[in-house]
Amino acid sequence: MNKLIRFLPLILVVALGVVLYRGLSLNPTELPSAMIGKAFPEFSLYGVYDAKTLKTQRDLKPGIKLVNVWGTWCPSCRVEHDFLLELSKSNRFSIYGLNYDDERNLAQKWLTTLGNPYHFSLFDEEGKLSVNLGVYAAPETFVVDHNNVIRKRFAGPLSANVWRQEFEPLLAQIEQEQQAGK
Amino acid sequence: MFIRFLSIFTLGLLFVFAQPVYASPVDTYEFKDEVTKIRFNALTKELRCPKCQNQNLADSNSPIAADLRREVYDLLNQGKADIEIVDFMVARYGDFVLYRPRVSSLTYILWFGPAFLLLIGVIVVVMVLRKKPQEKTNETLTQEQQSQLDNILKDKE
């Protein structure tokens, strides 16, 4: 017993060391979103192309939606753009853009020259909707299910790999729920 | 000699009066009163910028920090209480935005861990100090030992 007590400090230090060492390899920028499981926030914003009519959630199609936060100032958005174009061919979901902290003419030029994967892009100059969504930076992609609930937030550029690992299983799950009529 | 002293003295003065330079963003918000301004400054210092994680909202130049500062400003103007503004941020960005974490079952170890460790330390110290010194047997020398000692001392002389 007495001997064990003598070794107690050593054991504690080693245990603490293990815990702290593990902490070093965690990625501090991977934060859980506080919005998962909450309803997609209400909005009323103009589009990138259409600066006259306000768009609201009633303009979103029923079914599964991807909401992609982008900006022309964001290099990673350029990286994922081609993959978004590819995704836009799918009819399992509809893709909407949320243009964040950008300039309208630059955004329009971007979509015209690179191609437009979005049904429409909201023009969130002041970051109102982005803040409500808990957006940190671009690019970010949200999965919104048929009940208008946010199911996933992914920060970083999309790619085929990411899609297969992170999005496919969730989409399959939502589609199952949809069929079950939940 | 004197010139040398003077130059060192001036150099010293430079250090005394030097101000650290902060590259803080400059917003031009106008506040309706001094209290609101103080509350704004306090809130933007308490809230962490989600993008540049080791800066608060007041310090950060990132677009999201600017948007959040504007959000804080708007909420203040809407007459929201500090706690409501903090709740607004936590609802969107999670507990992470708080530089002072809330007391919850997740953060007990943060809040009470140090006090707990200190308590353990105190207990250990008290235990060590109160440990009874080992019974000192034969504190006085027996007659025989005394005479032996006397002999030894005598030899020395």
Image: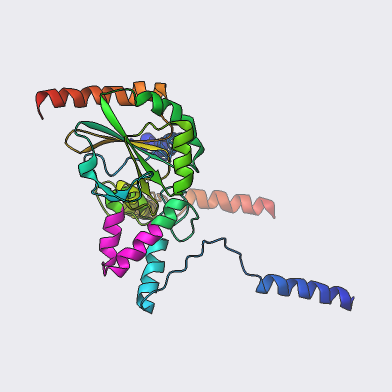
Location of residue B82 in the rendering, given as x and y in whole percent from the top left corner: 29, 66
Residue A98, visible in the rendered structure:
yes
Q: What residue is shown at x 49% (from left), y 48% (from top)?
A: B144
Q: What residue is shown at x 47% (from left), y 68% (from top)?
A: B28
Q: Quadrant of residue B5?
A: bottom right
Location of residue A19 in the rendering, given as x and y in whole percent from the top left corner: 41, 36
Q: Is residue B6 above or below residue A118?
A: below
Q: Is residue B69 magenta?
A: yes
Q: Is residue A43 left or right of residue B30?
A: left
Residue situated in front as seen by the camera: B128 or A115: A115
Residue situated in front as seen by the camera: B63 or B91: B63
Residue B139, visible in the rendered structure:
no
Residues shaded magenta: B68-89
Q: Quadrant of residue B122?
A: bottom left
Residue extending farthest left:
A181
Q: Is residue B14 above or below residue A99?
A: below
Q: Is residue A29 above or below residue A125?
A: above
Count of marks, rendered view:
0
Quadrant of the drawing holding the C terminus of chain B: bottom right
Q: Is residue B52 magenta?
A: no
Location of residue A117 in the rendering, given as x and y in whole percent from the top left corner: 38, 31
Q: What residue is shown at x 51% (from left), y 49% (from top)?
A: B145
Q: Is residue A6 left or right of residue A67?
A: right
How is the structure coloured here? rainbow
Quadrant of the drawing holding the N terminus of chain B: bottom right
Residue situated in front as seen by the camera: B138 or B116: B116
Location of residue A143 in the rendering, given as x and y in whole percent from the top left corner: 28, 34
Q: Is the stretch drawn in magenta largely helix, strand or loop?
A: helix
